[in-house]
Image (cartoon, grey):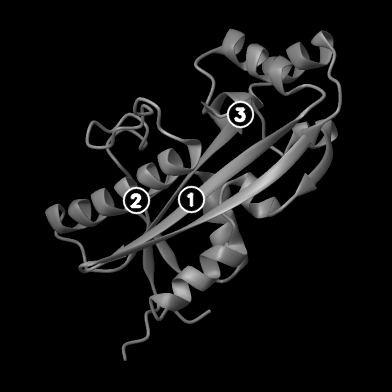
Amino acid sequence: MTVLNRIYLASCSPRRRELLAQIGVHFEPLLFRAGGREDCEILEDPLPDEAPEDYVCRVAIAKASHGVQLYKTRGLPHRPVLSADTTLDVDGEIIGKPRNEADAVAILRRLSGRTHRVLTAVAMCHEHRTEHVLSISEVRFRVLDDDEILRYVRSGEPMDKAGAYGIQGRAAMFVEEIRGSHSGIVGLPLCETALLLRHFNYSI
């Protein structure tokens, strides 16, 4: 049985890179043409009546599968591809990254004073095999006033993050309670990711 010692990460997220490095995974970034969410090969718009769990798993698997095609097309060494996708579930509605500042404000107002779910799917593809795992966490925000929402949005931090906030950044002061995986809320659940890597004979 071959023991793997290096993988590709199909993500441009600095947070996912930091988390993988935190647990000692050796990886090389495998960048899409336009940062993943704008790659025409990956449909990231929700399908009609698609549940948040189905959506986030579908997108993570699509990223991993597309990553395999990319390294083959580019003539790179064949290695497993790891990918992930994160979204919020608010009353059954999929909430991704904000389109603009006004959208970020609207999302944060909606999260104020209530609990939402953060879903992160992790997928791995190698040769003819694909597996995925799903981490679901709950986050409760305290009541936010409009001034602090506007200050936070103007900091720029929410603009590239699902749900318009980063729990590892300034938005930590909004969080009253979490249930689940802190790293999953950041963007890569380390417990589930480590177990998935083991399934593919990657030794950590």
Q: Nearer the viewer, residue 92 or 134?
A: 92
Mark 3 and mark 1 in contact? Answer it, CB < 8 Å.
no
Left or right of residue 45, residue 112 in this image: right
Q: Which secondary structure lies at badge 2?
A: helix
Where is residue 122? Give x, y as percent: 46, 55
Q: Which secondary structure lies at badge 3?
A: helix
The quarter holding residue 189 reads bottom right
Q: Residue at x 65, y 53 (%)?
A: 183
Left or right of residue 144, residue 191 in this image: left
Instruction: Answer above or below: position of 18 versus 145.
Output: below
The answer to which of marks 1 and 2 sits earlier in the sequence is 2
Instruction: Answer above or below: position of 24 versus 123.
Output: below
Q: Residue at x 37, y 42 (%)?
A: 59
Question: Residue type at mark 3?
Answer: Gly
The quarter holding residue 106 reads top right
Question: Residue type at mark 2?
Answer: Ile
Residue sitting farthest toward the front: 49
The answer to which of marks 3 and 1 sits earlier in the sequence is 1
Disc number placed over residue 61 in the picture, else none = 2
Residue 129 shows up from this direction: yes
Disc number placed over residue 193 in the picture, else none = none
Numbered label tally: 3
Where is residue 71? Give x, y as percent: 21, 57
Residue on which disc 1 sits: 121
Residue on which disc 3 sits: 163
